[in-house]
Image: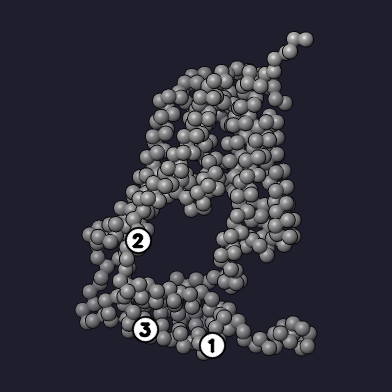
Amino acid sequence: MSVDAPASLYLDPQIRDWVLFPITLVMILVGVLRHYIVVLLQSPPKKLSRAGVREQRALLRSQILRATSSKSPIPPAHYKALSRHLSDAFKLGAYLKDGPPNGDAVSSATNALTDPATMDGMMAGMKTQLVMMVPQMIIMGWINFFFQGFVLIKLPFPLTFGFKSMLQRSIDAPDMDVRWVSSLSWYFLNLFGLNGLYRLFLGGDNSADSSRDMTMSPFASAGAAQLGQPQDFTKLFKAERDNLELSEGQYAWAGEELDVKVLRKYGKLLPRLD
Amino acid sequence: MASTADPTAQLYSLPNVLHNQCLTSVKFISACFSGAVAGILGLQNWRGFALFAISVLSTSFMMYAVNCKGKPSRYLPGGVGELINPGQDNIFTFILVWTLFYGIVHGMPSLFAVVDLGR
């Protein structure tokens, strides 16, 4: 099973010592370096004023209340009191950062590009994206420059013919089996395979994970930052009021008729017929 | 944004759910070792992937019996499915380690060649 009959290439073992292990080692180290650079580059979050924090927390309170409304752990009196209090407060704008809205009601959502707070957010996002992309480019360039023109390893599994152009880029042998690949394919194997290793050493939320680079793009982070800052809380509060009403309609206490339920469970009362 | 959350999801203790993710490191290590075994044995094509499947099943059986004590739905939100699923990362890890060991052991004939003692 280990000796393949057709066309077994005999490869210099020194290629393997000086190419296989160095590429893997370099990729592991660069990944760890990338993660720590991103950690160091992250600026501390901007501090909000007390009123600003109160504004956000008020929204959060109503969301928490709504999240469990269909099987709520709080009895009806408390739930309704909370819900009504929040609803009235939202209507009056009592929690707004700049105080209740006055007659002219100028929207505080400034242009995203001019507001300095959003600029910081977008820059931070783009900085991390840049840091993630640059090492990949550098390593690919390094591999293409130094480790070009020779067969590195034989893949133990077959691939379709279409991969040949990608995996045997620098080798001009049209008849060679796709399983003999060049160093660039080893780079790709490492790119995907080391994510698990990073997750083990750097924790789940690491920045060395290359699978996230593929799905995210610089525009995604810019878009997310744009949504973050210029939020018009007046509109949000209004939407939240509607949601609160909806949830109040769905509200059901988890402890309702608890005595009957317990009795039924222990067989002291006849079960329901429906 | 009327969220209709799963009513039983609120009953899960979030720190505990996050802690139970430590099983993923078990899956990763087993993927590494099975990759090494496949490479050293020189398995090719479907045989290597069959070994991976066997290792995934036996690892999840171990976790089922020892860690979850026969009731995976009490320990993992996804139940048995989440227990067995190796995850995309681990599949690639298996392929990487398999290729590495296959190349080392079976691609370098002179590395492990033993010299006749000449008696």
Q: Quadrant of the rendered structure where residue A109 is?
A: bottom left
Q: Earlier in the sequence, mark 3 or mark 2?
A: 2
Give the residue type at disc 2.
Pro
Would you call the spot at circle 1 few (<14 residues within 10 Å), some (14-19), or many (20 or more)? some
Q: Secondary structure at mark 2?
A: loop
Residue, disc 3:
A89
**Three-letter code for the amino acid on which mark 1 is drawn:** Pro
> At numbered mark 1, what does the secondary structure look like: helix, strand or loop?
helix
Residue at the image point whose x is 49% and y is 77% from the top: A66
Left/right of residue A101 with respect to residue B86 in the rendered view = left
| Quadrant position of the C terminus of chain A in the picture | bottom right
Q: Please name whichever residue, A35 or A273, is drawn nearer the observer in this view of the structure.
A: A35
Tag 3: amino acid: Ala
Provide the residue designation for mark 2.
A45
In the rendered view, tell whether residue A273 sits above or below residue B109: below
Subunit of label 1:
A
**Which one is earlier in the sequence, the residue at label 1 or at label 3?**
1
Q: Which mark is residue A76?
A: 1
The subunit letter for the residue under badge 3 reads: A
Answer with left or right where residue A110 lies relative to residue A26.
left
Residue A26 visible (yes or no)? yes
Vertical position of residue A70 compared to residue A231: above or below: below
Are the residues under marks 1 and 3 on the same chain? yes
> For residue A159, which quarter of the picture?
top right
Residue A4 horizontal/vertical position (percent): 68, 22
Q: Is the Cβ of the residue at disc 1 closer than 8 Å to that at disc 3?
A: no
Mark 3 in CB contact with mark 2 (< 8 angstroms): no
